Amino acid sequence: MRALGFHLLIEFYGCRHGILNDVGKIKNLMDEAAVVSGATIVESVFHRFNPHGVSGVVVIAESHLAIHTWPEYGYAAVDLFTCGEDVDPWKAYEFLEKCLTPRSTITKEIIRGEIEQNQGEVQYHPTLSRTEQAVGKHL
Amino acid sequence: MRALGFHLLIEFYGCRHGILNDVGKIKNLMDEAAVVSGATIVESVFHRFNPHGVSGVVVIAESHLAIHTWPEYGYAAVDLFTCGEDVDPWKAYEFLEKCLTPRSTITKEIIRGEIEQNQGEVQYHPTLSRTEQAVGKHL
């Protein structure tokens, strides 16, 4: 099997509360994490909620990085979803852990998009029906 | 334990190729999925890549929905990350499955942010140091 993507789900517990509520700092951290990992940033969107909490996503050419913070619990949920050989999500993870200084961390690694090794790319004919596409797959 | 968030990771295999490469349709689908689930859309960002593939994220007040497509494999990776009692990510899932018509689907359910039941909200004092924050937790 070949994997198209790699997804790292991270729970950062016991982070500094101030930073978790600072949308500017969180955006800068996530953008920097993307750069550190070798990713290419396409667009970043970040928002601060009332009374507290920040949500943000960095869309990268190699998928996305996301964060949601609960300052009241010192908790941040981070997703590092990458594809390709040129991006190392673990570098982003190490960078974020160093900056957010959590007391404890839980990570899960999930493989996304498992494709059979002998499965070539499907022929892409936008004008054909779905059945014809399936036939085209064997061309 | 109490969970702050719920994350549904979905692999849609064997989708119609045309729709997976249509950034306008994918954006509309994801925005609609957010509405169907009961979420409040904060911002949507979608991009089409060359030669093919779409990436997009809908930031919602209750976390985010994301999609990355590989039209050449008929594959889409979807994330539905929600929090709170008012959003039902399974409704978004059912809506997307109906629209993308995958031949097969794999889903994983991940609990995000497990907090002790007896853990009250941490006192939030932005002017205190991290050590003082920790002390404040027990106030």
Image: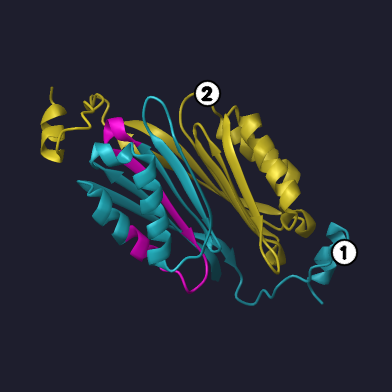
Chain colours: A cyan, B yellow
Comparing B42 with B67, the one in front is: B42
What x and y, as percent, mark residue B110? 44, 43
Q: Nearer the viewer, residue B122 or B116?
A: B122
- Residue at mark 2 to residue at mark 1: CA–CA distance: 42 Å
Question: Which residue does the image show at 14% across and 28% down from the upper left?
Answer: B136
Where does the image place residue A69, in percent across and percent down from the top left?
36, 38
Indicate the secondary structure of the residue bearing disc 2: loop
Which quadrant, please, contains the N terminus of chain B?
top left
Q: Which stretch appears magenta?
A: A70-93
| Residue B101 visible to an observer of this rendering | no
Mark 2: amino acid: Asp
Quarter of the image where one finds residue A18 = top left
Which corner quadrant of the image does residue B39 belong to?
top right
Tell me the subunit letter for badge 2: B
Residue A102 falls left or right of residue A87? left
Q: Name the residue under label 2.
A: B86
The vertical placement of B84 against B72, above or below, is above
Quarter the C terminus of chain B occupies: top left
Q: Please tell me whether mark 2 or mark 1 is closer to you in this view.
A: 2
Can residue B135 be seen in this snapshot?
yes
Q: Do labels 2 and 1 share a chain?
A: no
Residue B106: x, y in percent?
58, 51
Question: Residue beneath label 1, please?
Answer: A132
Circle 2 crowding by C-alpha within 10 Å: few under 14, some 14–19, many from 20: few
SS of the residue under disc 1: helix
Say what amino acid the circle numbered 1 marks.
Glu
Residue A138 vs residue B24, the one in the foreground = B24
The question of residue B136 being in magenta is answered with no
The residue lying at 46 percent from left, 44 percent from top is A56
Q: Position of residue B86 (x, y in %)?
A: 52, 23
Crowd band around label 1 with a 10 angstrom C-alpha radius: few (<14), some (14–19), many (20+): few
In the displayed structure, would residue A136 be above or below residue A98?
below
